[in-house]
Amino acid sequence: MPATGEHHPAFEEYCECIFELGEDDVSVIQARIADRLQVSRPAVSEMMKRLEAEGLITSDNGIRLTESGHELGEQTVRRHRLAEVFLTKFLKLSWAEAHHEAGRWEHVISDSVERAMNDLLGHPTTCPHGNPIPGSNYKAPESTPLSSIDVGADFTVERITEELEFAPGLLEFLEASAIQPGKIGTITAASPDGTLTVEIEGQHIGVGSFASERILVTS
């Protein structure tokens, strides 16, 4: 695995992005990388050339991480999610604050600090949003998108997928609405435009189709 500091943070950021897109079964194309990282498409195109020259990706038949690129992306994701657990559990930061701060921490956490954090946190298997921590003993439940749950049915929130973490304001909304892993709710209504009304902890909340298709639940 690449040593901390061996790769430029930008390389870590791009490998992390490609890893996460693949994790959510989203096709990895330059346009999606540009949207996720909020950079221009020419900038992504130039970075793809640099990543390929570094042996971190291949571009034959689509953008794919090489073995070393996968290791770098996995390491960056793991450190990001461990940092989120630490920041929410011990520093009591909000989901959104922890997500943004972890984006800085992921580039400076060393191997020894990563191991110490993991021990201190009790070897967590997911981040606060329910996304798996690579290398942990995570066992994926038989989950389904919230959008597939019938009106009147109960559900338990399992995971807020990474795509929602990058939608402006959504983390704040979901946390404030108690749409969090482990919370139990009920679908009380569905609108023709795909908006669902859910009841969680006495609140009635409208969840649009973009979010409901990406919130994973068990029923």
Image (cartoon, rainbow, N blue to C red):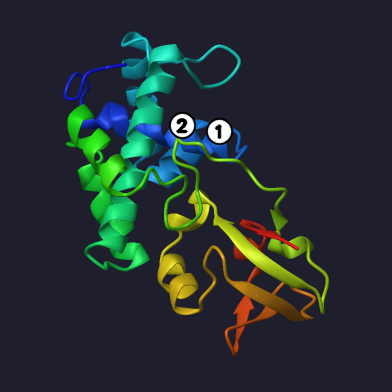
Q: The C terminus appears in which quarter of the rendering?
A: bottom right
Query: Who's the residue at 47% across and 31% down the image?
Result: 19
Instruction: Work out whether residue 186 or residue 11 is closer to the camera in this orientation and state it.
Output: 186
| Distance Cα–Cα, label 1 vs label 2 | 6 Å
Instruction: Work out whether residue 81 or residue 205 is closer to the camera in this orientation and state it.
Output: 81
Residue 110 seen in the current view: no
Residue 136 seen in the current view: yes
Q: Which mark is residue 18?
A: 2
Residue 213 place in picture, x, y as percent: 67, 58
Query: Who's the residue at 26% across and 34% down the image?
Result: 115
Asked if residue 83 lies left or right of residue 157, the reply is left
Q: Quadrant of residue 151?
A: bottom right
Q: Quick check: marks 1 and 2 in contact, CB under 8 Å? A: yes
Residue 123 place in picture, x, y as percent: 38, 43
Residue 57 place in picture, x, y as percent: 43, 16
Q: Which mark is residue 22?
A: 1
